[in-house]
Image (cartoon, helix red, strand yellow):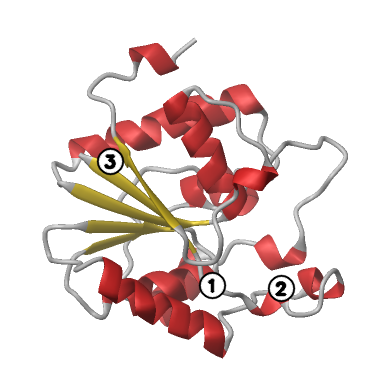
């Protein structure tokens, strides 16, 4: 099974750094919307695929535009929400990375479901500042869930730090911020048949 990680398009929170990072609930810019539409040329999403998106507006918008209303399974999950990379204990979650509530997602993105069992705490706090070992356990559980869906392709629309964290876990390779994907950049990885080598 293929895991295809896609970084969201250009967000409003990137236009006037660092102050714009204080924006609440930033969406895609017009350029970001065009970037998301360009992804259709790279991938022909079908009803046989599944799309999992971080529960923030810019990723849900990217996934919605990219899938072009294809009736595939679409899931919002805090397990692919913003994650700081590398982890800095003294840093806090920025306003631009605050997760939408399930009610907001139901209202604004009704094609997305919540098929995974996740605690209210995870929906409130996300994985941004989560300790590495706890993230590892949840990430492995998430990938096992993806594998169990029986799909050939799982598209994961997420964030630079989150994608890099998953890449590091899956590959066993150490990455830095220099390895971040660009806006709507993507990388394809094979989902392991067994996760025993990833567990400590």
**Above or below for 147 versus 33:** above
Q: Which residue is mark 2?
A: 14
Seen at 75% across and 53% down, the residue is: 93
Position of residue 160 in the picture relative to residue 131 (left or right)? left
Quarter of the view holding residue 170: top left
Q: Position of residue 128 (x, y in %)?
A: 66, 46
- Whether pointer 2 and pointer 3 mark residues with C-beta atoms closer than 8 Å, the reply is no
Calculate the distance from the C-alpha at mark 1 to the C-alpha at mark 3: 22 Å
> Residue at the location (66% across, 36% down)?
130
- Cα distance, mark 1 to mark 2? 11 Å
To which residue does mark 3 refer? Answer: 146
> Camera-side residue: 152 or 186?
186
Q: Position of residue 172 (x, y in %)?
A: 49, 22
Q: Is residue 160 left or right of residue 116?
A: right
State left or right for residue 93 relative to residue 101. right
The mark nearer the N terminus, 1 or 2, is: 2
Q: Earlier in the sequence, mark 2 or mark 3?
A: 2
Which element is circle 1 on?
helix
The total of numbered circles placed on residues is 3
Measure the alpha-carbon separation of dots 2 and 3.
Answer: 31 Å
In-front residue for pair 191/178: 178
User: In terms of image quadrants, where is residue 177?
Assistant: top right
Whether the residues at callouts 1 and 3 have beta carbons within 8 Å, the answer is no
Q: Residues within 10 Å of mark 2 (few under 14, many from 20)?
A: some
Identity of the residue drawn at 71% across and 74% down: 13
Q: Quadrant of the N terminus?
A: top left
Report which residue position mark 1 lands on.
58
Residue 54 point in image, percent of width and height: 48, 58
- Label 3 secondary element: helix
């Amino acid at each position: 099974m293929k895991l295809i990680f896609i970084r969201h398009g250009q967000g409003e929170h990137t236009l006037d750094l660092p102050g714009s990072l204080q924006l609440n609930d930033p969406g895609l810019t017009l350029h970001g919307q065009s970037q998301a539409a360009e992804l259709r040329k790279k991938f022909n999403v079908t009803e046989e695929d599944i799309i999992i998106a971080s529960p923030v507006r810019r990723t849900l918008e990217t996934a919605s535009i990219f899938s072009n209303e294809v009736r595939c399974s679409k899931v919002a999950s805090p397990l692919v929400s913003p994650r700081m990379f590398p982890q800095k204990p003294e840093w806090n979650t920025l306003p631009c990375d605050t997760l939408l509530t399930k009610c907001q997602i139901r209202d604004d993105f009704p094609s997305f479901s919540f098929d995974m069992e996740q605690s209210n705490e995870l929906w409130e706090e996300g994985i941004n500042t989560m300790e590495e070992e706890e993230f590892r356990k949840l990430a492995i559980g998430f990938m096992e869930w993806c594998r169990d869906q029986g799909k050939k392709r799982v598209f994961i629309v997420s964030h630079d730090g989150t994608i890099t964290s998953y890449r590091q876990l899956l590959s066993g390779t150490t990455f830095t911020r220099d390895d971040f994907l660009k806006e709507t950049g993507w990388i394809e990885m094979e989902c392991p048949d067994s996760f025993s080598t990833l567990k400590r």
